[in-house]
Amino acid sequence: MMNVKGFGAAEREYLRKHHTHEIKDNQCSSFLIKRIKAPVHLVWSHVRRFDQPQKYKPFVSRCIVQGNLEIGSLREVDVKSGLPATTSTERLELLDDNEHILSVRIVGGDHRLRNYSSIVSVHPEVIDGRPGTVVIESFVVDVPEGNTKDETCYFVEALIRCNLKSLADVSERLAVQDRTEPINRT
């Protein structure tokens, strides 16, 4: 089980409910939480786009989806230079527009992320009196030969951290343009 000390009851419940992974001995797993000053519908509109991850993922240069956008759909992602990869083949495992959950599994590519699976969940939260969002991304991945669990988790967490920061930047920029009224808590 993931270490959830230091997080609130809501985050612990989201992790328990939506972020369960079967972890084998040769794998590592972790999660990251990002608060975004933008309403859920706006953040989810980016996260749910399995066919356009480049809209907020800075390391993706191009994405081509094979077939309809449904569970089991595959996408071919081209990775920008600077990373130890050029392509990734990924399968849509879950897309739940009611619960705001996206799950993706890497099934191929020229990289070392074998048996990688991630779950992203998006939840409403009031931030500074305005509608905001808590995004949680968890993953499990094989530890490549020659690396430790810590090294592998550190690398994947760094990528996810960049993606979540970019998601926050894009969403918050749009939220400012479509400013929502403060929430009255009386």
Image (spheres, grey):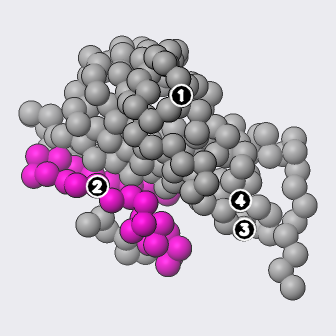
Magenta-highlighted residues: 8-35
Helix, strand or loop under label 1: loop
Q: Which residue is mark 2?
A: 21
Q: Is residue 16 magenta?
A: yes
What amino acid is found at the position of numbered circle 2 in the picture? Answer: His
- Residue at left 23%, top 36%? 115
Indicate the secondary structure of the residue bearing disc 4. strand
Residue 17 location in percent, x, y? 42, 66
Callout 2 crowding tier (Cα within 10 Å): few <14, some 14–19, many ≥20: some
In the image, is 36 to the left or to the right of 67? right
Q: Identify which residue, 56 or 66, lies in the foreground.
A: 66
How far from the left and from the top, in percent, is residue 59?
48, 25
- Marks 3 and 2, how far apart at CA: 28 Å
The residue positioned farthest toward the bottom in the image shown: 186
Quarter of the N terminus within the rendering: bottom left
- Which label sits on residue 69? 1
Q: Amino acid at mark 4?
A: Gly
Residue that carries the numbered disc 4 in the rendered image: 132
Secondary structure under the numbered disc 2 in the rendered image: loop
For label 4, the crowd category at 10 Å Cα-Cα, with few meaning under 14, some 14 to 19 and many 20 or more, is: many
What element does badge 3 sit on? strand
Closest to the camera, between mark 3 and mark 1, is 1
Q: Are marks 3 and 4 in contact (CB under 8 Å)?
A: yes
Q: Residue at x 58, y 52 (%)?
A: 100
How packed mark 3 is, by other alpha carbons closer than 10 Å (few <14, some 14-19, many 20 or more), is some
Tell me which numbered mark, 4 or 2, is placed earlier along the sequence.
2
x, y percent for residue 58: 54, 27
Check whether the beta carbons of the residues at disc 3 and disc 2 lie within 8 A of each other. no
Asked if residue 79 is among those painted magenta in the image, a careful observer would answer no
Going by the numbered disc 3, the residue's amino acid type is Val
Tell me the tag on residue 126.
3
